[in-house]
Amino acid sequence: MGRKYLKIAAVYFTIGVLLGLIMGIIHDFRLASVHAHFNLLGWVSMALFGLIYHFYPNAADTKLAKTQFWLHNIGLPVMQLAIAGAILTENTVFIPIAIAGSLLVVLGVILFTVNVFKHVGASASRKSDNDVSI
């Protein structure tokens, strides 16, 4: 799971940076919130999920981690495309879609938190601390 998260994080980072570049070139910053969400919920959050799952494989090898991955990776693009649609068309028909995508992301984050509390315990961190040599 760690590798999958890191790879998809790089994709979201690219999308966020390209969107920022395009907004700068055309001097239209209406999609700044979409740009920020792709960078924060896509790049930063996914990279952190990936690193945590790399260092805590017990947490990575769970149904929670796999379900979280799909909820986050379905919810985030749905949410962002709907927000972009609402902003660019000024049509509120996209708002319920954005809310649905947001709820998938929130549910994924809750599953991540549950997974961390269940599988990232004191004994796991003590073991990894003992493996580090200075």
Image (cartoon, rainbow, N blue to C red):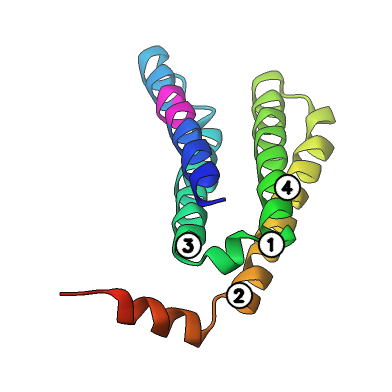
Q: Residue 53 carries which label?
A: none
Image location (x, y in percent) of residue 3: 49, 45
Q: In this view, does 55 lie to the left or right of 67?
A: left
Residue 25, horizontal then vertical, whole percent = 36, 14
Classify 10 Å Cα crowding around label 2: few (below 14), some (14-19), many (20 and above).
some
In the image, the segment drawn in magenta is 14-19
Tell me residue 104's x, y (percent). Answer: 76, 49
The CA distance from mark 4 to mark 3 is: 18 Å
Q: Name the residue under label 1.
A: 62
Q: What element carries label 1?
A: loop
**Residue at left offset 54%, top offset 29%:** 31
> What is the CA distance from the residue labelled 4 to the residue labelled 2?
20 Å
Q: Is mark 4 on a helix, strand or loop?
A: helix
Residue drawn at (64%, 34%), measured in percent from left and top?
80
Amino acid type, label 2: His
Label 4 vs label 3, nearer the camera: 3
Residues under numbered marks 3 and 2 in contact, where contact means CB atoms less than 8 Å apart? no
Q: How far apart are marks 1 and 3 (CA)?
A: 13 Å
Residue 128: image quadrant is bottom left
Which disc is residue 119 wearing?
A: 2
Residue type at numbered disc 4:
Leu
**Residue shown at 74% from the left, 52% from the top:** 67
Earlier residue among tags 4 and 3? 3
Mark closest to the chain's N terminus, 2 or 1? 1
Determine which residue is flagged by label 4.
71
